[in-house]
Amino acid sequence: MNINGLTRTIGLIGNPVEHTLSPVIHNNISKRMDIDSVYVPFRVEADGLDKAINGAYELNILGLNVTVPHKNAVKEFLVDIDGAARDIGAVNTLVRDESKHGYKGYNTDYMGLERQIKEDGIELSGRTVAILGAGGAAKAVTYMCIKNGASKIYILNRTIDKARQIAEDMYGLLNNDTSLYNSFCDSSKETDKDNMLIKDIVVDRISSKEYIIPISLNDNNVITEDNLIAFQATSIGLSPNIDKVVIEDKEFYKKIAVGVDLIYNPATTKFMKLVNENGGKAYNALKMLLYQGVAAYELWHKISVPQEIIEEVYLELKRSVYPKDNIVLIGFMGSGKSTVGKALAERASMNFIDSDEYIENKAGMSIADIFEKMGEDEFRRIETETLIELRDNLSNTVLATGGGMPLRRENAILLKEIGRVFYLTAANRVIYDRVKEDTKRPLLFCDDPYSKICDLMKERRPLYEKACDVKVDTNSNDLEEVLAAIS
Ligand code: ATR
């Protein structure tokens, strides 16, 4: 990072801010897009909020995220507020407005959730929704569900008055705020049943106040609909209390087709497990975290972050939230992945897996036979399938991979999700000397294996470099030196 006189500051105000993941998002986008800005967390006490915001403006800070406990209080100190943030009643992003000499507030939490559910293919239009919780997060979820045309919304909370309050606030908006009403009408779908429009049904429900239904968590059995989309918006189930969930009753989960937990740590919450066990599809909200950050970044820098960069940043984010203790070795055949991997595993009391052997056991035939009988494409497909399996199950393991493994972009991403990736490098001639006697290398079944190695290396080297975290030179053939470079 090169900080200079032109570097712009962006950041976060909240209390506490020590565990925030936002720097991972923003500083990675800046680095990858070569944008000269730096993201810094600032701990701000409640009674110093006004001074912090005025001071930030005077310090020429480009923009700020706002987190607990300031998301509501901050509204007082803004020069403008975006419609959705005003409706939801919470602001998590401040964007500098020179013309008004202050900051405009936005709610990118809501934008992030909307973008996540679109990306995950969750269609809210015409669907019945159940929201667990009635805090700030639940309010943003309710707003998003209305905006995207949900046909009925249950809000379930321990303290029913809070659920009632959200319902009242939303009815107020639907009756007085044409923008929410219009986007709801635009999004709600036609149904061919009796030629009725869901929209008409819901408009009736809105007027009779039967559209948003507050209920106590214990009364969840009053929900008669199934095929629900459910959002878990309470703090229950968050790590380390991973065995907790606000509703245990299996009958409730049988009614859920899709469940989204706003918690992302652990990656699979108890709520998500219960949704899965009862036949539904479950998602956590790590992408919401990612996209609320991307949305803020785009507002501050007035740019659009390319999807490829978003995917890379998502990977970094995953690695920060769910750090893996595995080591992955990549490189050309003969670069020493098996030898180094086995020695490393033994020294560090780790397990060792060779992905080629793993695939051979799984397929019940040798790699050479898979190539011959099924073709290279099928082999590559099996490799990807295997990596997904390994990503979800491996820990404390050294994984040595087949030479072609990181060539597919999706495999390269999966390898980084599995662990820290080391690229074992060696000169073409060194590799040739190491493999020339080996009869089990289908790619070298040709008249001039050395030229084949040179051709393949030319193509593969940049891909290996892109797929790795660390490069390790093995030309010396000195195992100790290589092990020292890895551990
Ligand atoms: P946020 O702004 O992140 O949504 P919040 O406003 O503190 O956070 O809301 C937390 C949610 O978790 C609320 O719905 C809360 O229920 P209450 O309104 O009844 O307090 C819910 N919650 C917290 N602890 C709970 C518990 N032990 N059992 C059930 N719900 C709980």
Image (spheres, grey):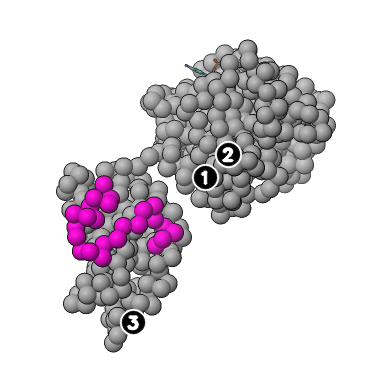
Q: Does residue 287 lie above or below 399 as drawn?
A: above
Mark 3 or mark 1: whose residue is earlier in sequence: 1
Circle 3 or circle 2, nearest the eye: 2
Q: Nearer the viewer, residue 256 or 286?
A: 286
Check disc 1 and report the residue beneath it.
1
- Magenta span contains residue 368: no
> What segment is highlighted magenta in the picture?
464-487
Where disc 1 sits, the SS reads: loop
101 or 412, nearer to the observer: 101
Amino acid on which the number 3 mark rests in the picture:
Ser
Q: Position of residue 126 (x, y in %)?
A: 68, 39
Q: Which residue is mark 2?
A: 38
Mark in front: 2 vs 1: 1
What residue is shown with label 3?
Answer: 451
State the residue at coordinates (54%, 35%).
22
State if disc 1 and disc 2 touch (CB < 8 Å). Answer: yes
What is the distance, in whole Å, between disc 2 and disc 1 at their CAs? 9 Å
| Marks 3 and 2 close (CB-CB < 8 Å) | no
- Mark 2 neighbour class, 10 Å CA radius: few under 14, some 14 to 19, many 20 or more: some
The structure residue drawn at horizontal position 53% and vertical position 32%, both measured from the top left corner, is: 262
Q: Circle 3 sits in a helix, a strand or a loop, which is it?
A: helix
Q: Earlier in the sequence, mark 2 or mark 1?
A: 1
Tell me which amino acid carries mark 2.
Val
Q: Is 75 displayed left or right of 15 in the figure?
A: right
**Counting other residues with Cα less than 10 Å from the Cα at mark 3, is it few (<14), some (14-19), or many (20 or more)?**
some
Residue 331: quarter of image = bottom left
